[in-house]
Amino acid sequence: MTIIPILASAGITGFESPAGDYRQLPLSLDELLVEHPSATFIGKASGDSMQGVGIFDGDILIVDRHVTARDGDVIVANLNGEFICKLLDVPRRLLLSANDMYSSVAITQHDIFTIEGVVIRSIRCHRQSPLLCSR
């Protein structure tokens, strides 16, 4: 093992903070993450069916109701009373998982199906937020 001697002394003066080169951007997280505030809701992902597109269990989903869903979009939908997050395959009328362990789901004429919104962003919390804990 090689030991690299590092000499440190208290009270060093004359050096700027490394953060001195950075400037504050006039931007809020709301502006960055939410495009249509009055048509946006936040959900929490559950399960591992969307890992292939980078959505993991416990991730926060920012869902926009104003955006029109297109083929290949990640959507939140209500299928027969159950909220699900899937990839939309419009031509084949399928809901696809992004994990090979799960089968696709066909949308039939007998299903009650509504698209609740398009997932436009997802956020991974590396520490649990007290605001997101179940009560």
Image (tube, grey):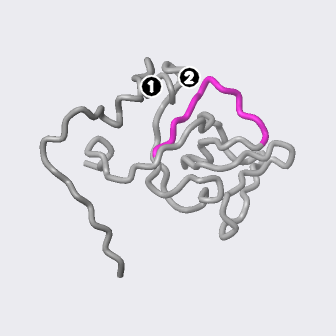
Instruction: Find residue 47 and report its horizontal and vertical position in percent.
Output: 51, 60
Q: Which residue position is annotated with label 1? A: 30
> Which amino acid does the dot numbered 2 rest on?
Glu
> Which amino acid does the dot numbered 1 rest on?
Asp
Q: Considering only vertical position in the picture, is 75 above or below 1?
A: above
At 72% from the left and 55% from the top, the residue drawn is 96
Q: Which residue position is annotated with label 2? A: 35
Choose top left, top right, bottom left or bottom right for residue 120.
Answer: top right
**Quick one: 124 or 75, which is closer to the camera?**
124
Q: Please provide the residue range marked out in magenta.
A: 60-71
At 48% from the left and 56% from the top, the residue drawn is 46
Q: Residues within 10 Å of mark 2 (few under 14, many from 20)?
A: some
Measured in 3D between alpha carbons, the distance from the residue under mark 2 to the one under mark 1, in whole angstroms, is 8 Å
**Residue 113 shows which numbered tag?**
none
Q: How many marks?
A: 2
Residue extending furthest toward the left:
10
